[in-house]
Image: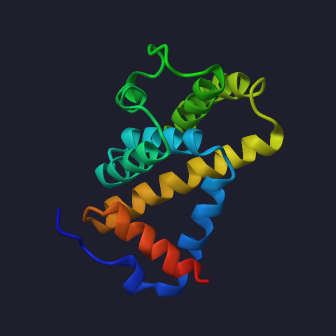
Amino acid sequence: MKARFDPVAAAPELMKAWIGAAPPIAASLEPALAELVEIRASQINGCASCIHMHSQFARENGETEQRIYLLPAWREAPCYTRRERAALAWTDALTLLSDASARERAYEALRPHFTGEEMVKLTLTIVVINGWNRIAMGCGGFADPAAARAVATAVAGP
């Protein structure tokens, strides 16, 4: 897919703020969980670029192919912990906002496995990846994971 426009070139200061916020939010959770959440939201949104990128990052962090491949069917797959299942349910509920009862069920499932602070961290991680999905799909193109890391590193500065 050909890129429609480069958001960093079009609005460098705004994108610097956005890019700068994303890594510390994702890093506030354990890496394996953050990557599962980022892949899952990207699957729901159909963002091939983000699925590709976060699947590669997950593998680099030691995630198994089985767990990556089974994410679309996480409810039926036995390889996720209760905490991961709660996070994935919350991801689904906050990515697909129109079902209020699903949100309530997901919240109730989340409470035994996450502290209030962890719920905020998880929620912000979901918000950020949904934002990235929309930026990636709106701007078009297909991001190379190494290039995306380089941009994030350059924006973050020394």
Q: Is residue 74 left or right of residue 120?
A: left
Number of numbered labels in the structure image = 0
Give the vertical position of 12 relative to 110 (above or below): below
Rendered image quadrant of residue 141? bottom left
Give the vertical position of 8 relative to 22 (above or below): below
Q: Is residue 48 left or right of residue 50?
A: left
Looking at the image, which residue is at 37% across and 53% down?
53
Looking at the image, which residue is at 51% across and 75% down?
153
Looking at the image, which residue is at 50% across and 53% down?
129
Looking at the image, which residue is at 53% across and 80% down?
155
Coloring basis for residues: rainbow
Give the vertical position of 107 relative to 30 (above or below): above
Q: Residue furthest right?
A: 116
Image position, residue 92 (x, y; %): 51, 33
Give the vertical position of 112 relative to 55 (above or below): above
Q: Nearer the viewer, residue 11 or 38?
A: 38
Image position, residue 64 (x, y; %): 42, 32
Image position, residue 118 (x, y; %): 75, 42
Question: Quadrant where the N terminus lies?
Answer: bottom left
Rendered image quadrant of residue 59? top left
Rendered image quadrant of residue 109? top right
Image position, residue 132 (x, y; %): 45, 59
Q: Nearer the viewer, residue 148 or 134?
A: 148
Q: Is residue 116 left or right of residue 3?
A: right
Question: Quadrant where the C terminus lies?
Answer: bottom right
